[in-house]
Every structure is written in structure tokens, then in C-alpha cells.
Amino acid sequence: MPTRSILQSGNSVDYVDWGAQFGQRFIITVDTEEDFDWNQPFSDTEFGLESAALLDRFQLFCKNQSVTPIYLVDYPIITHAPAAERLKSAVDAGEAHVGMQLHPWVNPPQQEELNERNSFAGNLPRELERAKILTLTEEIEKTIGVAPIIYRAGRYGAGPHTAELLTEAGIVFDSSVRSGFDYSAKGGPDYAHHPLRPYWLDRDAPLMELPLTTTFWGLLRRQAQMLYPKLRNAPLARSLLSRTGFLERIALTPEGIGAEEAIRAIDIATDDGLPLLNFSFHSPSLQPGHTPYVRSEAHVDRLYDWWRSVLAYCAQRNVRPASLDDLSEAAKLSL
């Protein structure tokens, strides 16, 4: 079976069947990355690593919640000894997974011009994208002692060659697709019409897509895939539809999404029979001042309160946590 491009959408989708016993589950994916100013031009030197020290607190929180987080690490993180040691300790204890996240502007080999278009790794020449993926894969395996099996393109920037390159690198799970979002105005991919259910990019490789979870709420939610993309350049119209209860896009993240909104999204996803919810956020949000979503210690407390509320509601809805091992076993994969 030929490898399906991550950028493909449409009706001929080979959805993953985990079986009735799998039920409905969730994963937490953490974009584990350097601290940088999101409003400044991309730089391969202007970044920090202070927030990496806060990974211990989040890991302890997850352990107490019986959740196995998936840390998608980029090159500055995995080559930062204190962060790598924290992550390796959690992996060795069986309490976390470490996968990869490619930020091409800080990941060698650095041969491209630093600009917005090239910040989406899938826009790079095939061999350069390949070299960056293999460099990061090898660094993680050397440092953590386990080869990564899950990937996310930074800025969700998958491209036409990404899937085949991931197969070459031994990746089993991709999580670059942010369903319901369109980044084409910035030179990135368009996922507006991609499905929410996990699906096979290549059943034989194997390579499975685990889309980030985004749902639509409101009176027009059944028309969202048709209607919402047409409002890409009309933020006021989207805001009006949201405020009036006609149509609201809700991503499962504590960054910019309230707990009540997330709980509505969980209800929609579970009622629609979605087998896997994919929560995500950026690790710099664990410390004030690095992302637009967390500017004070009170915001950090609010982030943890968000997780407490959302995870408690998942338990109430019988949506249980899953590890990558659980996903592999249920899909009958031999890794």
C-alpha cells in the first residue's frame, strides 16, 4: 500500500479500528520546546531554556493523575542536559514517552533561509527535511536510550514528503495534523477538511495519524467543515458566530480555551464516538512570560486547574488515559 501524504484529505480514509474493548481514550501531547518570542522573526540563537526546569512539576502532576504524557521534544531541548535528564528519568520509570517535534530553524543541518515559509519543515527541500528528521531522531535515541516513534512537525508544518521520511526514520505515529485549522495564509498546510478520527497513513509501514482534537459547537456545527474555512479572512464574523452560539471552534488545549469550553468539546467528541482525544499544549506555558497564554503565576495556577477540571470530566465520561503502548497493543502493532 503506498504511503498516504499527510496533506491528503477526502473520503477514502483508512480509519484505525482499535476494537470495542478500547473504548474511548485520551492522550496528552506536549510540544516540548525552547522559549522564544512568538512575535519576533525566527532565530537560531535568540531563545532560552528556563521553562524546561518546570517539566518536573508537570510530570509529577501527570503521575498523580495516572496519565502517561507524550513529550514531543525539539533539538534545543534534547541537547540541553538538565531537560534531557528529567525526560530520561520519566521514560526509564515507564511514566512518560519522548517523541520528536521538528523546529527546523533551530535543528541542524541549518542550510535554509530563516523565514516564515521555511518554519514549516514540509516546505523544505526533501533531502534537507530528511536530514533534519534523522538528526533529531538520532539525538533522541542517543540521549534517551529509546528510539522515538511519534512525530509532530513544529507549527504543524507537514509537507508532501513528510510521511515517507517518517517511515524511513522508524516513526509509527504522526501527530502533525491540526484538524479544522488552515495555515496556508502563512505558507503552511491546510487541515480544514482533515478528519478527527485517527487513520492509517500506511497500514503496512506502519504509520498512523493521530490528529489533534478540535471540535465545533453551536447550531451550525454540522456545517462547520463547509462554512468555517470560508470565514478564514473574516475574524469578526467568526467571533460573532461564536458569541451568538451559532458556531465555535474549540481545540482541546488549555492555551486560549477555557475549561467549560473544553468540557463542551469533550461532550461533542465522545457523543460523536471519537475513539481518541488528543490534548496538547506548549511546554513554555509552564512558566510565566514565554507564551501569550501564561503571563503570570496566577495563569500557571489556572493552567493546572484547567487540567484538573478536564481530566476529572474525562473520568466522569469514562474517557480513560492511553499510552503509546496502549495504542500499539490495541492496533496489534509489534514495535
Image: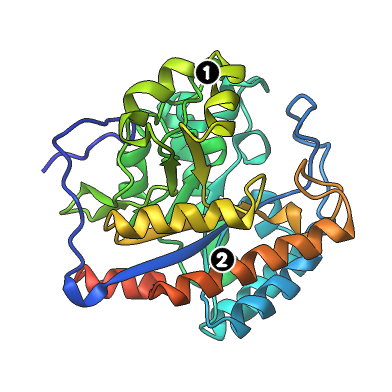
Residue 111 appears left or right of 201: right
Residue at 39%, 47% (x, y): give it: 211
Q: Is residue 274 above or below residue 41?
A: below
Q: Is residue 289 above or below residue 223?
A: below
Q: Which amino acid, by three-letter code, is at mark 2?
A: Val
Mark seen at residue 39:
none
Residue at 61%, 40% (x, y): give it: 103
Q: Residues within 10 Å of mark 1 (few under 14, many from 20)?
A: some
- Give the image quarter of residue 193: top left
Q: Nearer the viewer, residue 167 or 255?
A: 255
Mark 1 touches mark 2? (CB < 8 Å) = no
For the residue labelled by badge 2, is the local secondary structure a helix, a strand or a loop? Answer: helix
Q: Position of residue 22 (x, y in %)?
A: 25, 74
In primary-sequence order, the first of circles 1 and 2 is: 1
| Nearer to us: label 1 or label 2 | 2
Residue at mark 1 to residue at mark 2: CA–CA distance: 33 Å
Q: Is residue 130 above or below residue 86?
A: above
- Residue under pointer 1: 187
Q: Which amino acid, by three-letter code, is at mark 1?
A: Gly
Q: Position of residue 242 (x, y in %)?
A: 55, 32
Q: Position of residue 281 (x, y in %)?
A: 61, 53
Residue at 56%, 40% (x, y): give it: 154
- Residue under pointer 2: 310
Residue 92 appears left or right of 226: right
Q: Nearer the viewer, residue 303 or 151?
A: 303
